Amino acid sequence: MQAEHVSNFGLQFNQGRLFAAGPLGDNGFIRGIVVLNVTNSNDIKDCFKTNPFIQNGILEAESHPWLVDLMKFGAPVVPFHIAQHTLCIVKKGRNWKTSPSPPATDTVLRLFPGLKHKAVFRQLAISGPFLDDGEKLGVLVFYSTNLAAIKAELDKEPAVAEGAPKSK
């Protein structure tokens, strides 16, 4: 099944629909991330229709439209290789207030202004807001795998201290 799972990602990549994919590796509730270049839920279903883990109910896909600068992904590496990063999902905190501004590629960085230097100095790989109106606000992807240091830095951010967004 694993070979078919990875083969499906190769097919999606070859069709121009897959930008990035990989396991999270922490055995948590969210098992991995797949970044697709699709526009609607039918396209998402189509991408996973031959995935044996989805088809056999072992995994389930949760999707969120995401606003991100695609140039941050860089040129694809062929053959692919897995690199370790830290994925942070930003969620609404207990004191969350919806912003009147429309989402932009820097929306998540505006929530965490102390991280702007990490983007400039290529320590923050990718960030961007989700466009749906759910509990999850967006994503931060760090090149570092030092989870304790990342969490400590996020905890210093005023928005986290005030209970606006929270990161997981």
Image (spheres, rainbow, N blue to C red):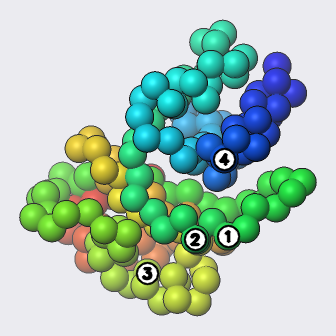
Q: Position of residue 83 (x, y in %)?
A: 77, 60
Q: Secondary structure at mark 1?
A: loop
Query: What residue is pinned by disc 3?
Result: 115
Across and down, in percent, residue 48 comes to 62, 25
**Disc on the earlier residue, 1 or 3:** 1
The answer to whether residue 19 is above or below residue 28 is: below
Could you say where residue 135 lies in the image, as x and y percent from the top left? 28, 43
Dot 4, crowdedness within 10 Å: few (<14), some or many (≥20)? few
* Image depth: mark 2 or mark 3 in front: 2
From the image, state whether disc 2 or disc 4 is nearer to you.
Answer: 4
Say what secondary structure mark 2 lies in.
helix
At label 4, the amino acid type is: Gly
**Mark number displayed over residue 71:** 2
Toward which corner of the image does residue 149 lie, by quadrant? bottom right
Q: Decide: marks 2, 3 in contact (CB < 8 A)? A: no
- Rounded to the nearest angstrom, the CA distance separating label 1 from label 2 is 5 Å
Q: Which residue is mark 1?
A: 74
Q: Nearer the viewer, mark 4 or mark 1?
A: 4
Marks 4/3 in contact by CB < 8 Å: the verdict is no
Question: Which callout, 2 or 4, points at the residue further toward the start of the chain?
Answer: 4
Q: Nearer the viewer, residue 57 or 4?
A: 4
Q: Disc 1 and disc 3: Cα gap in Å?
A: 21 Å
Q: Nearer the viewer, residue 107 or 69?
A: 69
